[in-house]
Amino acid sequence: MDPLQRLLAERACERLVVDFVHRLDLGEPSSVAELFTEDGTWEWPEGGRLIKGRAALREYFGSRPADRLSRRLMSNILVTVTPTAPDTALATSYFSTYRVDGYAGGVVPAGPPVQVGHYQDAFRQVDGVWLLETRVLFLPFGGPTPRVGC
């Protein structure tokens, strides 16, 4: 793979990582399913959650509470295109999640993040488009989601 092709592949995968959290926080949460392959999976081993396929992913992410306010910060996104299979890539990225339930508008007093962890992702290029194939969540720091005013 020439360096420009590798750079474009890495950037496309980085874009998926950021688009995922943007859709959860500022878009339509169920639309993150479109970022996955048809047979894509999202897994949280600690909680025993494994969601398979776009329809299940759409339902899972679309079920978040309507009154939830969240902002996720992504960093340290390291994408590696697979040298022997240039239509696949792996990535690790760190995240922090700030979140409250019961949000009705306005400014909420700042608090610590409710989650700090990392994702391990596998990507696959399908018909020229990079998509998430698997996303695994690792959460070494976590706590309950606070309610506004409580």
Image (cartoon, rainbow, N blue to C red):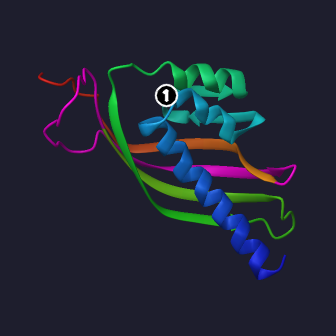
Please provide percent x and percent y for residue 8: 71, 69
Drawn side of residue 91 relative to residue 39, left or right: left
Please provide percent x and percent y for residue 121: 63, 50
Q: Which of 140 and 112 is in front in this view?
A: 112
Q: Nearer the viewer, residue 12 or 95?
A: 12
Drawn side of residue 127 relative to residue 22, left or right: right
Furthest residue to the bottom?
A: 3
* Residue that carries the numbered disc 1 in the rendered image: 47
Amino acid carrying label 1: it is: Gly
Q: Measured along the vertical axis of the image, is residue 68 above or below residue 73? A: above
Question: Which stretch is magenta?
Answer: 99-128
Q: Name the residue: 23% across, 22% down.
A: 104
Q: In which quarter of the image is residue 82?
A: bottom right
Q: How many marks?
A: 1
Q: Name the residue: 82% across, 80% down.
A: 2
Please provide percent x and percent y for residue 6: 75, 73
Q: Is mark 1 on a helix, strand or loop?
A: helix
Furthest residue to the front?
A: 106
The magenta stretch spans residue 113: yes
Q: Nearer the viewer, residue 27 or 37?
A: 27
Drawn side of residue 59 relative to residue 63, left or right: right
Quadrant position of the N terminus in the picture: bottom right
Q: Quadrant of residue 70?
A: top left
Q: Measured along the vertical axis of the image, is residue 36 above or below residue 83? A: above
Q: Quadrant of residue 15?
A: bottom right
The magenta stretch spans residue 48: no
Q: Measured along the vertical axis of the image, is residue 138 above or below residue 92? A: above
